[in-house]
Amino acid sequence: PGAALAPRTSVALDGARTATPAGRTSTAEGKQKTVDSVSQDIDDAALLFSFDGSGLAINVIDDLRKRLPEAAKTRVVKNTLFKRAAVKSGFEDSILVAPELAKNNMWVFAGEDDMKTTFKAFEGWVKENGLEKPVKGGFFDGAFLDSAGVIKVKDLPTMPDLMLKLCVSLNLAGSLGIAKSIKAAKGNPRQVAVAISKIEEKDLA
């Protein structure tokens, strides 16, 4: 017999090699590992969004990974496994059946302080590679967002931005009132921003 064939290390997605090793999700154990891993990515991300991942060569996918901030990541996840991972992370089943998320999905996961830079890196990757890969939708703070919603959320101020604004707000309100408002916001950037805005409105009234 001839020489043994080398094991396959990738699968084809619409004819193009991708960065997903074959067999990783072919067994129950492999699928569970993927679910656990994706669930962790969801837990670590403040914003996650998807786009059509079909037809991308492995070097193009690698280019996106290189552009993303260090704490951000992107990966192809089968819809069934993503749903299992999202449920494990506390998502409601009802928000996981949005038609925008049907078919092939490649997910991008961004932390609180990297939402804007992650999305900017994604936009640059799409443009410079001449791709037609619009954002399909995503999730933020446990809620589903359509493509327009993802674009709006990525422009939310980061925690450093909010802390700078907080210092300015100290001139408008007592430190005790600020502390109570920030504690009630539980560190969520959107809630912190709302809390600071309310303080400013109250003291300017």
Image (cartoon, grey):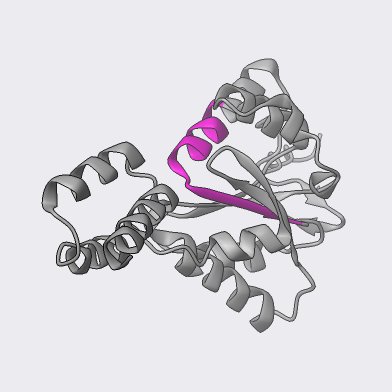
**The magenta segment:** 36-51
Q: Is residue 128 above or below residue 160?
A: below
- The answer to whether residue 48 is visible is yes
Extreme residue toward the top, this view: 28
Q: Is residue 10 magenta?
A: no
Q: Residue at horizontal 41%, vertical 54%?
A: 194
Extreme residue toward the front, this view: 205
Instruction: Name the foreground residue: 143 vs 35.
Output: 143
Q: Position of residue 60 (x, y in %)?
A: 65, 68
Instruction: Name the foreground residue: 39 vs 60.
Output: 39
Q: Is residue 190 above or below residue 34?
A: below
- Quarter of the figure with residue 9: top right
Q: Residue at horizontal 80%, vertical 35%?
A: 97
Q: Position of residue 88 (x, y in %)?
A: 58, 22
Q: Is residue 19 above or below residue 97?
A: below
Q: Quadrant of the C terminus?
A: bottom left
Q: Is residue 161 above or below residue 194?
A: below
Q: Position of residue 106 (x, y in %)?
A: 69, 51
- The answer to whether residue 18 is visible is no
- Quarter of the figure with residue 185: top left
Q: Left of 134 or right of it: where is 197? A: left
Instruction: Name the foreground residue: 194 vs 61.
Output: 194
Q: Position of residue 153 (x, y in %)?
A: 55, 59
Q: Quadrant of the N terminus?
A: top right
Q: Left of 31 or right of it: where is 166? A: left
Q: Residue at horizontal 74%, vertical 40%?
A: 5
Q: Left of 170 or right of it: where is 55? A: right
Instruction: Name the foreground residue: 53 vs 180.
Output: 180
